[in-house]
Image (cartoon, helix red, strand yellow):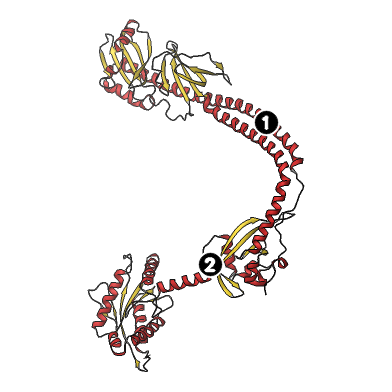
Amino acid sequence: MRRSFNTTVSWSLNPVTRKSWLRKALPVFAVLVASNIVVNTYQSLHDFRAADQQAAQRVDVQTSLIQRLVEGRLRDLNGMMAVTRTLIDADNLTDQSLHDVTDTLKESLGDSSIVVFDGSARLVAGSRPGVRNEISNLTAILDTVRAAPATHLWLPVVWRQSGALVVAEGHRNRAGKFDAIAVYLIPLEQHLLEGVKLVNGTAIILSDSEHRVIARYPRYSGLAIGHELVEDNAPRQGPIPGTHYTRWSFDPTERLIATRRIVLGPSAGYWTLDVGYAVSSYRDSLRNSMYINLAGTTLLLLMLAGGVLLIYREHRLHDRIERFAGTVLTIVQNMPTPVTIVDIKTEHIVLANEALLALFGAVAGKGQPFSRLFVDAAGWTRVREVVTDEPVPLLTRDGIRHMLVHCTRLRTGDKGDEPDSLLVTLVDITHQHQLLKQLRTEADFDALTGLANRRYFAKAAEKAVEHARRHHRPQSVLALDLDFFKRVNDTWGHAAGDRVLQVTARSFENALREDDLAARLGGEEFAAILLDTDLEQARTIAERIRIAVQDTPISLESGATVSQTLSIGIALYDEKESDLGATQERADAALYAAKNQGRNCVQIWVPDTTSPLNEG
């Protein structure tokens, strides 16, 4: 008897009418929007000041670091000059000695060079051949030093497309006589910033007391070594002492710059180190944040306006929702597909339609555990957690049916907060499941004997090889063939031959162990895979099969009784082989040897011999 949906289910989809809270919340929301605008404005101004302060401190620290690097190079340069003076004083000046000096300081001063001339500007020694040709205006430099031997020249030059420094000084012997001129070529830009992690947008300029550029980073196309550095605008004071904002003539980018003065000595003047950050590099993100805040404020204002519109439309939407809910309930009640709503926490049925009740009866009523509908409760646990296309057996009034179970998470409720639920739909595919099962059986098993066919045997062979190689276990293969089977067909007919095949296959399979696989490969040919089995164990099993088949009388439909024997070949699988193909060939060779030995016997293929040995 069919049960009525209305009498068995009291769960409802009808919404509960509540008074609108939006009308009361709207003024509060307006105050919050105004407060948000004020807070965001203050926060943006504060963030800009904090970003400037942080960037100034960072560029100041980095400037100090680079200053120490430059001063370290100057100390090494002074050391090089002192060693050169000592070599001149000791009259130990050679090309090799100068080369040793530059090579010792190569790590800090790079590919520097030294060339020494006598008081008449004749070459005395050089750290490497041809170095005098690499120094531009060398003649003018020598003339200047000769005219004023006490002069120390510090000249920025371009060397190998990079900034370099030429230092020239005169030398007086112990008697006070001017006797030599030492010229030093220092590739200042080479390795200057090695090991220094620079912030994106960083610019560095090193200039002398005459504002001539000695080194620069990056290498601006409009700023050459030795050119005078000019600022476009008067600098503005930076966030902390020692910093300022400015623009260079060759770079229109506004930068926050920290400056350091590096003293060279009482007669050589000083250098100026400027390290600058592009203001846009740290302010652009703040501007983007400010624009996002502005967009958020605009969105809040739009939401405020939308709230007013929602209040107006709410009562109209309420009526439509009620009508829609009634329509959905009617659809669920009258769907031909079994549908139910299950509480996630309790796993009990909350709502069941007529199709579900008609299929399962009272066990599918409200409050019943949904898992009771399944043959195995674990099936319900599996389908509720994982989406699957595999059918699940369920217990219906008509017996076990295989169905697809589809679960959709949803939220239901009336006056209070209800737990999450599952919308469960069932699709009966029992007929398709049976057809698929039958097709799979026909594809993998021999229809006459019920043993695995050649296709299934090949798949099982792959898994057997994988097992043997992973666990390093022995594995044997049997090749079997019925003796004089053609006589049976010729004497008693093909129906009798089929009967002999069936009885022999049953005796063959019963003589094997549980984990062994028996298969019919075609005609009267059979095979078996023996897992974890060495040759001695395989011989015992093969003898058991041979005797079982030999001692089993076969009754034919004509009333006659016949007996059948078979020959068996055995081969052991070798782990070096990637499949069972070669093993099967060896088992077939052993089988042919058994045939040649008179049939009804067992032969083993021994790998270290050229022919099988009769073990039967």
Residue 277 image offset from top left, x and y in percent: 50, 24
Q: Identify whether 570 is placed above or below 166.
A: below
* Residue that protrudes farthest toward the bottom in the picture: 559
- Amino acid type, callout 2: Pro
Residue at figure coordinates x 57%, y 64% from the top left: 405
Quadrant for residue 459, please give it. Answer: bottom left
Furthest toward the top, the residue is: 147
Quadrant containing the C terminus is bottom left
- For the image, the number of numbered tags is 2
Q: Is residue 344 visible?
A: no
Return the residue nearer the eye: 428 or 176. 428
Label 2: few (<14), some (14–19) or many (≥20) C-alpha neighbours in 10 Å:
many
Callout 1: 10 Å neighbours few (<14), some, many (20+)?
Answer: some
- Identify the mark at residue 37; answer none if there is no mark: 1
Name which quarter of the figure residue 88 lies in. Answer: top left
Considering every residue shown, the one lying at the far left of the view is: 610
Dot 1 amino acid type: Ile
Say what secondary structure mark 1 lies in: helix
Picture coordinates of residue 175 (x, y %)? Answer: 32, 8
Query: Which residue in the protein does label 2 denote?
Result: 391
* Left or right side of 91 for 23: right
Q: Nearer the viewer, mark 1 or mark 2?
A: 2
Q: Position of residue 99 (x, y in %)?
A: 30, 23
